[in-house]
């Protein structure tokens, strides 16, 4: 029994599960939008390949989350998805000290946002693993998705390190 008196094998409360999954879908939507923009704008960076791979995988993860929400008969909130879109667009307004050209800090900071999103996503897959059986879902699939999120984190950290080495110097490929 948990401190709330619920047994671990009890299914999560439906309303709480819906809120939780909607919140993660909102975050995943924002992350796909952010990675799409990064993919379009950062083809000249040494981490362009990593960004393309992350975009593909994060899009797949978002699609899988949509499937989970549908399979559980839960509804999606259009308002939260609109909020994700608006927030992502607002995040692009920060100039990072440069108005006419891209600041070398911008891709660095955006990778940090992506890192936060992937970290949160690993928690989603972990939570679904815990409750998979009671929800009629495949725990092994969610374990695998959690492991993929950890690998994605490693990839983002490595890309961040590569950009950090160059971001603060005048000879940076992003400085021009």
Image (cartoon, rainbow, N blue to C red):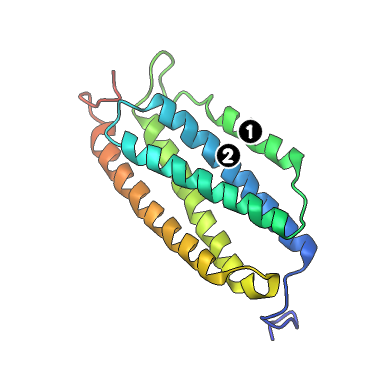
Say which residue appears at 77% left-offset and 50% top-offset.
75
Q: Is residue 165 left or right of residue 154?
A: left
Q: Quadrant of the C terminus?
A: top left
The number of callouts visible is 2
Q: Residue 104 in the image: x percent, y percent? A: 33, 28
Nearer to me, 34 or 139: 139
148 up-or-down from 85: above or below:
below
Q: Residue 158 in the image: x percent, y percent? A: 30, 48
Which residue is under mark 2? 30
Q: Are marks 1 and 2 in contact (CB under 8 Å)?
A: yes
Labels 1 and 2: the sequence-earlier one: 2
47 up-or-down from 144: above or below:
above
Image disc number at residue 148: none
Q: Residues within 10 Å of mark 1 (few under 14, many from 20)?
A: some
Secondary structure at numbered mark 1: helix
Which residue is under mark 1? 85
Q: Residue 119 in the image: x percent, y percent? A: 48, 55
Say which residue appears at 43% left-offset and 58% top-offset.
148
Corner quadrant of residue 17: bottom right
Q: Residue 170 in the image: x percent, y percent? A: 22, 24
120 up-or-down from 10: above or below:
above
Secondary structure at numbered mark 2: helix
């Amino acid at each position: 029994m948990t401190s709330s008196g619920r047994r671990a094998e009890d299914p999560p409360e439906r309303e709480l599960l819906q809120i939780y999954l909607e919140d993660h879908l909102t975050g995943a939507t924002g992350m796909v939008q952010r990675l799409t923009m990064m993919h379009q704008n950062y083809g000249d960076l040494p981490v362009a390949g990593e960004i393309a791979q992350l975009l593909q995988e994060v899009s797949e993860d978002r699609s899988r989350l949509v499937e989970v929400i549908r399979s559980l008969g839960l509804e999606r909130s259009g308002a939260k998805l609109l909020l994700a879109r608006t927030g992502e667009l607002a995040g692009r307004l920060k100039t990072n000290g440069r108005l006419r050209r891209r600041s070398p800090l911008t891709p660095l900071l955006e990778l940090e946002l992506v890192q936060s999103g992937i970290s949160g996503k690993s928690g989603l897959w972990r939570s679904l693993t815990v409750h998979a059986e009671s929800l009629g879902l495949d725990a092994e699939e969610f374990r695998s998705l959690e492991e993929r999120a950890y690998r994605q984190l490693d990839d983002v950290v490595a890309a961040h390190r590569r950009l950090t080495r160059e971001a603060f110097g005048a000879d940076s490929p992003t400085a021009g």
